Image (cartoon, grey):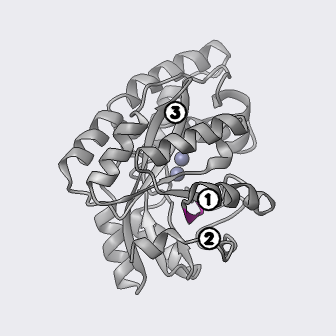
Amino acid sequence: MNADLHCHSYYSDGLLSPSDVMRRAHAHGVELATLSDHDETAGVPEAHDTALELGMRFVSGVEVSVTWGDDQTIHVIGLGIDIYNHALSDGLEAVRGGREARALRIGDELAKVGIVGAYDGAMRHARNPALISRSHFARYIVECGLAKDVKSVFNAWLGRGLPGYIPHQWATLEQCVSWINGAGGVAVVAHPGRYWMEPKVMESFLGEFKELGGRGIEVLSSSHRPEKVEIFADYARRFGFLASRASDFHAPGESWTDLGKLPSLPPDLKPVWSELL
Ligand SMILES: [Zn+2]
Ligand SMILES: [Zn+2]
């Protein structure tokens, strides 16, 4: 099955509408899709309707921002959630609440290193001001000609420890997993290759995630190259996690891969969609 269980629309920091994301997924052969915007489910009904019209299967999704341990930002995908569940929707609303204040501070810090007008520039890229994110800043900085692509902006200014990085308290891991499980969903660790963690710290994170009721990990992700898949496949085996396949698509041309284009999961792993369909 060509399943792609992580992508974004313009309801968070993607460029396309939910319908256009589903059309692109379908054109790339995706058979099971989701929409997993950051801390927001407003695009899910539109994506759901378009996916079904196109003859794809669909599960609802969300990507929850979590602060764990020593100021680590972790993303957790909730799949198969009831988007009308109150605890989940109230929790997501609270998480969204911090974004604008953080964005103002990012703008101030970038001005100190000579990037002027970044807050206003990023806001122009954010369709929903409540969901302004670092990707919007990155697109503005690329537009100014200061970097060749979004990834270079993260490496030069926006990543952890860099001048435009502002730590922020998102949801706790416990809150996040309980919202997802309470809404009938499956919680999956997003893009594990992106976290700056020693293997020991990664193991303690995954152990805590499992203990709290987390059940899956993205074994295939745009955050790591196919040659690193075995590292994350191994975590799935050791922790008994369901395995997900996840392009984390945001916009055409922003990643080395695209919707529906990742390789297949290692055959011995249990795909997360076996629990969703
Ligand atoms: Zn993410
Ligand atoms: Zn994502």
Identify the mark nearer the N-term, 1 or 2: 1
Q: CA distance from mark 3 to mark 1?
A: 40 Å
Q: Which residue is mark 1?
A: 236
Residue 263 image point, x, y percent:
70, 73
Q: Which residue is mark 3?
A: 121
Dominant SS type (magenta): strand
Please tell me whether mark 1 sits on a helix, a strand or a loop: helix
Does 244 lie within the magenta span?
Answer: yes
Residue in the foreground of this view, choosing between 15 and 156: 156
In the rendered structure, which amino acid carries the disc numbered 2? Leu
In the rendered structure, which amino acid carries the disc numbered 3? Gly
Is residue 32 in view from this perspective? Answer: yes
Magenta region: 242-248
Q: Quadrant of the C terminus?
A: bottom left
Does 246 lie within the magenta span?
Answer: yes
Please tell me whether residue 59 is drawn above or below residue 194 in the rendered image.
below
